[in-house]
Image: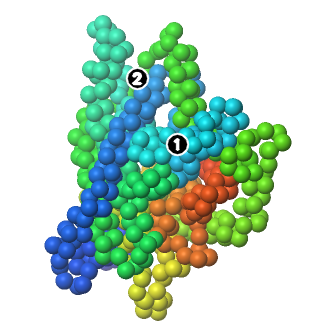
Amino acid sequence: MIPVRFRLGAFGAWATVLAAVCLLSLLPMGRLLLAALAPGGELDVTAFLQRLTTPAALKATWHTLDTAFFGAVLAIAIGAPISVAVTMTDLPGRRAIGFLLLLPMMIAPQVTALSWLHLFGPSSALLNALGIAPPPGTPNPIIGREGIILLYGVQHAPILFVTLRVGLARIPRDFVEAARAAGSGPLRVLATIVLPLMRPYLIGAAALAFVSGIGNFGIPALLGLQVNYLTLPTLIYRQMASFGPNVLPQMAGLSVLIGILALFGIAVQAFASGHSARYSGGILARFPLGRWRWPLATLAWSAIVLLLVVPALALLTTALVPSFGVRLTLDTLTFSNFGEVLTRQAATIRAFRNSTLLSAAAAIFLALGAIPFALAMERVGERSGRWLQSALELPYAVPGIVLAIACILLFLRPLPLIGSLYATAWIILIAYLMRFAVFAAKPVATAVRQIPRELDEAAAACGAGTRRRMWTISAPLAIPAAVAGALLVFMGAFNELTVSALLWSGGNETLGVVLFSLEEAGLATHAAAIAVITILAVVLILVVLDRLSSRLPTGVLPWR
């Protein structure tokens, strides 16, 4: 018979995990489905389908699928070759190249869009400084469909890089050496050995890039709204900005459609992962580049410079001129834009304060809860744990605009004891907790799985209870992973826009919202200054995480 103490412990673990998953994931998603399918309390599928088949919705759906698909194709073209070069060759500087390629994934999409937006066009501070700006009146080529696809490729290439690198690192050197001994050249080995083994990883990574494009708001908002090129997230934003909560049933329907498209991509990724070839690891396969070593390194660094460094320089030069369109010289160079957004503009000062406090609060709450959650997950069983983990990931897997609509529906009406949270900072904090819970949970779960069971068993044999074992054994060993998870949460929430774009209110602006608003208002130099500051903050956090790498479980940091 199972001891009562063990049964109570298992019940407590189940209750802890289920409560967390319900509050952070199932409750908001369930409320969204209810509003979409039964806005009046009764199931009405016909009305739901009618809302999805309006001309505006159909056009936005086509734009969403079109840009997400071709963006994923471009992400493959950028990320896959660099992943092979960094993982399987002796390319000089490959670690630095891999680290830099990951930066777009860590930086907010609206910052990426802003940097490319300021790179081209007759008002580009960088092109004007070099004397190669196009004549006044020339349209900015980055605006519209092609620009959105290009930036989706740049923004989501790190997804391909990280995913393929995991698979490439598992290919044993024996496979490659056997093919080379049989007379196959490097390109033939890549085509006949590496590519077939990588097909599941490639399909899964492409599906994730497609999903990321489906829910991306920052890039199509800055590059598409001004030419009326709407995707589903920007259509929801425009209608909510115009009509407010009165159109929530319509927005709930569109959000469910976005969620279905995203979940389809996730299902493809999961299917591909489940059908990957099974082979033992071994020594990492390497292709010596020989005389091609430095030419290929030059090509790789040129790609990094063109895709990352040049747009960042365009953003920096815009922040250093007194007004957009002024040529950057020693006489016009100024840091007043940084002083303006940091010390004089009330809205930007509030945004820095709000984003810092909300991101820090979300990071602290999730880090504190991640350790008991991970320990509880260890006791619910492997199969149940996978389902519960997938449910916890749902608010991050679906686009942020979907989660924002779900939070509005959940907290618009007054709740017992606390009233309505709509138009308060609390609704943003709760949305951050829901969206970034997986950032805190995964590193800690990885660390907990690597703790030897013998330590816990020895403490239990000495009479230590569950709580004492958790706080004296598991928690100290998992704290570095919890700190890393907290930093990842802070970095993700600090300059996000997709969630807070619909949840902010007067006095509760976040950095992403203010940056977007300044750019729309024509204050491009101030928006650029904020973007440069957020990039510096992200780089600083990445440096801290890199310094923690020796104390973290393998796989927590994708560039390691």
User: In this rendering, is residue 445 above or below 85?
Assistant: below
Mark 2 vs 1, N-terminal side = 1
Tell me the residue at 20%/69% (across/down). 50
Tell which of 292 and 551 is nearer to you: 292
Q: How crowded is mark 1: few (under 14 residues within 10 Å), some or many (20 or more)?
A: few
Please tell me whether mark 1 sits on a helix, a strand or a loop: loop
Tell which of 490 and 4 is nearer to you: 490
The amino acid pointed to by label 1 is: Pro
Quarter of the image with the N terminus in it: bottom left
Tell me the residue at 48%/14% (across/down). 289
Please tell me whether mark 2 sits on a helix, a strand or a loop: loop
User: In this rendering, is residue 442 above or below 239?
Assistant: above
Tell me the residue at 27%/20% (across/down). 192
**Which percent across, then down, holds residue 552?**
54, 48
Badges 2 and 1: C-beta atoms under 8 Å apart?
A: no
Name the residue tied to disc 1.
139
Tell which of 187 and 114 is nearer to you: 114
**Which percent across, then down, holds residue 401?**
41, 64
Name the residue tied to disc 2.
285
User: In this rendering, is residue 542 above or below 38?
Assistant: above
Residue 356 at least partly seen: yes
In the image, which disc is placed on residue 261?
Answer: none
Outermost residue on the right side: it is 331
